[in-house]
């Protein structure tokens, strides 16, 4: 429960949510920090803060190749989070709500 709360808190900022969607769309190979910065139009220092928060929450991973930094979605952790949100759907007697 604590980890899911941390992850949801990390997603509670519009820029971080935009970053996550963009990186997920980029696939498992990862998306460069420069491409992410261009997409969200955010200063590098601010972007670094947002990316760090997503990595610490386990929603993204990072790797370096020379001077480039790439961020990739942590699909297993994203799946665990979404499964958690749906696992008790309709268990209070609501018919076919999902």
Image (cartoon, rainbow, N blue to C red):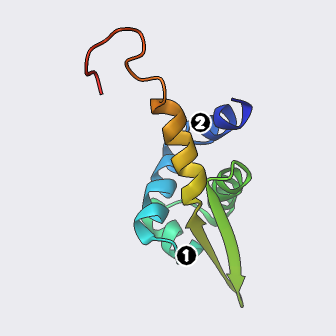
Residue 92 or residue 53, whichever sits in front = 92
Residue depicted at x 63% and y 35%: 9
Furthest residue in direction bottom, as rendered: 66
Residue 35 or residue 95, whichever sits in front = 95
For the residue carrying disc 2, how many other residues have a C-alpha within 10 Å: few (<14), some (14-19), or many (20+)? some
- Look at the numbered disc 2 and give the secondary structure of its residue: helix
- Residue 95 at x, y percent in the picture: 26, 15
> What is the quadrant of the C terminus in the image?
top left
Residue depicted at x 51% and y 72%: 28
Position of 82 relative to 28 (above/below): above
In the rendered structure, the answer to whether residue 59 lies left or right of residue 26 reads right
Residue that label 1 marks: 34
Position of 80 relative to 72 (above/below): above
- Residue 66 at x, y percent in the picture: 72, 91
Mark 2 or 1: in front is 2
Residue 93 or residue 78, whichever sits in front = 93
- In which image quadrant can residue 46 be found? bottom right
Furthest residue in direction top, as rendered: 93
Residue that label 2 marks: 8
- Cα–Cα span, label 2 and label 1: 25 Å
- Residue 26 at x, y percent in the picture: 44, 71
């Amino acid at each position: 429960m604590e980890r899911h709360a941390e992850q949801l808190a990390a997603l509670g900022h519009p820029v971080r949510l935009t970053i996550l969607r963009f990186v997920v769309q980029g696939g498992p190979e990862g998306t460069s920090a420069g491409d992410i910065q261009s997409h969200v139009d955010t200063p590098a220092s601010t972007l670094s803060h947002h990316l760090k928060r997503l990595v610490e929450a386990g929603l993204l991973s990072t790797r370096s190749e020379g001077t480039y930094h790439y961020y990739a979605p942590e699909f297993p952790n994203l799946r665990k989070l979404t499964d958690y949100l749906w696992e008790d759907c309709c268990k209070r007697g609501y018919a076919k709500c999902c």
